[in-house]
Image (cartoon, grey):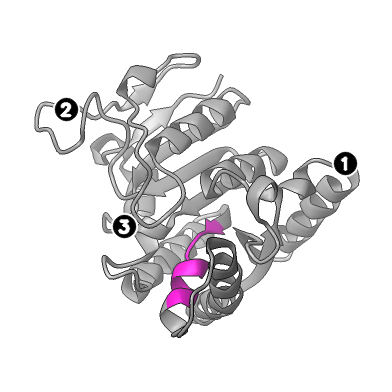
Amino acid sequence: MNRIVVKVGSNVLTTDAGKLDITRMSALVDQIAWMRHHGYEVILVSSGAVACGRRELRVDHELDSVEQRQLYSAVGQVKLVNLYYDLFREYGMHVGQVLTMKENFQTEEQYQNQRACMEVMLQNGVIPVVNENDTVCVTELMFTDNDELSGLIAQMLKAETLILLSNIDGVYTGNPENPEAKLIRSVAPGESLEQYIQTSKSSRGRGGMQSKYHTASTVAGEGIRVIIANGERENILIDLITNPKDTPHTEFQPS
C-alpha cells in the first residue's frame, strides 16, 4: 500500500483573522478520505492547535511567549482533534492523536515505541493525527517547526511520499508575487535551490519556505519523494495524485 505523510501548516488551516478555517479543514478531510478509499495509507501532521486555543480563550492578563504557547496549545489541541474526529467520522473513519517531541526521535527505545504505535494504528485503519507536544516542548526541546517533524515521521514510517502543504504553489525562481518568477516543477537529487529560497517565516506559523526546502532536501536524500504544494487550492491532494502534470507544485526527486 502506498504510504503518504501529509503535513498541513497553520497558514493553510487558519483564516487571515487567525481563526481555524473549518471549511478548509473539512475539504482536507474529504480529500484524505478519498485517498484512503483509493488504497493510500495517510499520516496527517497537522498544525493549528495554538491558533485554535488563542481563539477559544480570552486572557485578561499578560502572558509570556512560553506561557501563551503552553496554554493555547493545551486548550486548542483538544478542539483540533475533536474537529478531526467529527469530520472523519462522517466517512466511518477513525483517527488517533499522536503528540511527540524531539526527544522521542533521539533515544532508540522511544523511537521504536513511537513507530510501533503508529504502525499498529495504520494496520487497524486508524489515521494518525500528529503534532508537536507544545505543552512541554519549549526552547531547545522544540522542533524547528512541523516541516521538520513531518520529515522525521516520513523517514521513520518509510513513507513513499511526503506532501508539504503551504500557502503558495512551491519553490519559485524569485518572489512568488513577481510575475516574472517561475515555479520550479522538479528538483533533481542533490540539486541546490539555495539562491531562490527566501528566509522570511510564514505569518501564522513557525516555518517558511526555507524550512520546507531544508526538510524536502533532507527527506529526498533518504529516498522519499517530497512535494511542496498549495493547500489552499481546491482538491490539491486528489489533483496531485490524478493529474500531477497540470497541478502546480514543486517535486523533489528521491535519490
Q: Residues within 10 Å of mark 3 (few under 14, many from 20)?
A: some
Q: Residues within 10 Å of mark 1 (few under 14, many from 20)?
A: few
Tag shown at residue 181: 2
Q: Residues within 10 Å of mark 2 (few under 14, many from 20)?
A: some
Residue at which label 1 appears: 108
Relative horizontal placement of residue 27, taking residue 36 as reference (left or right) = left
The correct choice, above or below, for 57 with respect to 215 in the image is below
Q: Which residues are magenta?
A: 45-54
Residue at which label 3 appears: 235
**Can residue 204 be seen?**
yes
Predominant SS along the magenta part: helix
Identified at 33% across, 52% down, the residue is 236
Q: Residue furthest left?
A: 179
Q: Residue furthest front?
A: 62
The amino acid at mark 1 is Glu
Element type where label 2 sits in the image: loop
The amino acid at mark 2 is Ala
Real-space CA distance between mark 3 and mark 1, rounded to the nearest whole angstrom? 38 Å
Q: Looking at the picture, how far across and down is residue 247, in whole percent?
A: 27, 41
Sequence-wise, which precedes: disc 3 or disc 1? 1
Front: mark 3 or 1: 1
Element type where label 1 sits in the image: helix
